Image: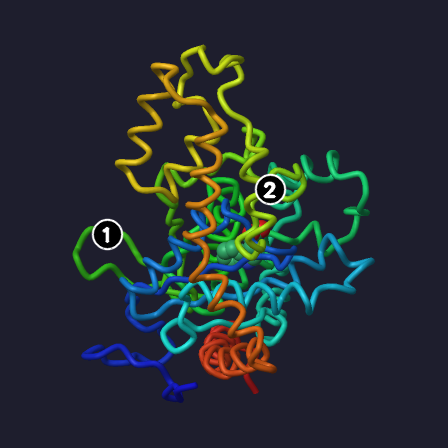
Amino acid sequence: MPEMPETPETPGMPETPGMPETPEEIILTGYRPTGRMHLGHWFGNLQNMLALQHDFDETYYFVADWHALTSDWADPGRLIEHTEDMVLDWCAAGIDPEKSTIYRQSDIPQIAELNIYFALVTPMGWLERVPTYKEQRDNIQDKDLGNVGFFQYPMLQGADIAIMRATQVPVGEDQLPHLEVGREIVRRFNYTYGEVVKDGKGKGEDLVVGPLVEPQALIAGAGARVPGLDGRKMSKSYDNALFISDDEETLRHKAMGCITDPARKLKTDPGDPDICPLHQIHRLVGDAAVIAEFDECCRKASCGCVAHKRKFADDIVAYLAPFRARRGELAGLSGYAKEVLAAGAAKARPKAEETIRLCRDAMNITL
Ligand code: TRP
C-alpha cells in the first residue's frame, strides 16, 4: 500500500490558517455491510464507484459498520464477515485500494467525536422529520429501532461525510433526505462556530466561513435500477437476487427461473421485451446484437423464452467470470481485506484529525 503524504495538499492553493482547503472535488460514499452484493448493487453502485475512481483524484469508499449496528445492534455476530466480504467484492470489481481510500467507519474514531459536536447543533425535530425514520420504525418489525443510535442515523451519516470534507456524495435517491439533514447540520455548525467575513464584492452580504464543507449529492444515472428475477426491484430480502459471487451452477439455476412477460403464456403468443425482466437483466450483461435478435423474435413469437433463458444463463456466467476469478484470488490471500482496511484507515485518519482540529479551534475548545 502506498504512503500518503501527511497533509493532502491542493496544488497551487495557499493554506489559510483556520480555513478549509479550497475545495477540489472530493468523492465519498459508504455502504452498510449487510451481506453479499447482488447485480442491483453492481450496476446501481459499483459501476458508478468505478467511474468516479477513474474520473477523480480523491475518492473515499468506506464500510459503514456503525450504521449497520444502529439496526443490528442486538446481533453483531456477522459484522466482520460482512465487512470483509464487502471489501473483497469492491476490490475484485476493480476498486483499487491504491487509488481509492477504502476504510471502515469504526477505524476512524474522529467520526464519533464529530458526531458529538453535531449532536449539539442538531434539533431533535430535524431527525424526527426524516421520512425514512418513521417509515422504517413502523415497517421493520423484527428489530428494535427505538434506540438513540437509529434515531441519529442521518446525523452520523453527516459526520461521515463532513469528516473527510467531501464535496460530492454519490447516493441513491432514497438517501437524499439523509444528505439534506447532513447539509443543514453542517450549515448550522458553520454558522454557530464559523467566522463572519465581510463580503468583498460589495454586494453587502456577509459570508459565514466555517471549517466544514456542505456536500452535494451525486445521483447515479437513470437505468441503474435492476429488476430481480421476479420483476420486483432486486433485493436480498425478496429472494430474487443474482449475487455477484454466486457460483456458476447457482447462476444457471437462477437464470432458468427468471420470470418473463407474464402475458406471454404460449410460445406462439407474441411478447413484450420492454416489460420482461429477463430482457431487462440480459440487456445489462449481453451483447447488443444478440439482445436485439431476442427482442425481435419475442415480439414475433418466433422463439421461446426457454431458449432465451439458456442464452442469458451463458451470458451472465461469462459476464461475472472474471470478477469471480479475481474474487477467488483475493479471498485466497490471507488477511487481504484486513490489510486493505488498515492501509485505508491510515490514509483517512490524518484528514479526519485535521477536520477535528479545525472544529475544536472554531469552537474555542482547544487548550
Ligand atoms: N445510509 C447509507 C446506506 O444505507 C450508508 C451511509 C452511511 C452513507 N454513511 C454514509 C452513504 C455517508 C453515503 C455517505 O447505504
- Disc 2 residue: CB within 8 Å of ligand 1: no
Q: Is residue 92 left or right of residue 341?
A: left
Q: Is residue 28 above or below residue 300?
A: below
Q: Quadrant of residue 35?
A: bottom right
Q: Position of residue 290 (x, y in %)?
A: 31, 36
| SS label for mark 2 | helix
Q: Give the residue drawn at x 70%, y 65%.
A: 79
Q: Is residue 42 left or right of residue 70?
A: left
Mark before the other along the chain sequence, 1 or 2:
1
Residue visible at 61% across and 48% down in the picture: 250
Q: Which mark is residue 253?
A: 2
Figure quarter occupied by ligand 1: bottom right
Q: Taking 331 as reference, is 326 left or right? A: left
**What residue is rendered at 65% in x and 55% in y?**
34
Q: Nearer the viewer, residue 139 or 17?
A: 139
- Please tell me whether mark 1 sits on a helix, a strand or a loop: loop
**Residue at the spot of label 1:** 204
Q: Nearer the viewer, residue 250 or 37?
A: 250
Q: Residues within 10 Å of mark 1 (few under 14, many from 20)?
A: few
The quadrant holding residue 57 is bottom left
Say which quadrant the N terminus sits in: bottom left
Kindly identify the amino acid type of the residue bearing the numbered disc 1: Gly
Give above or below for 140 relative to 299. Answer: below
Q: Which residue is depicted at the point 47% across and 75% down?
A: 355
Q: Amino acid at mark 2?
A: His
Local packing at callout 2 (Cα closer than 10 Å; few below 14, some 14-19, many 20+) is: few
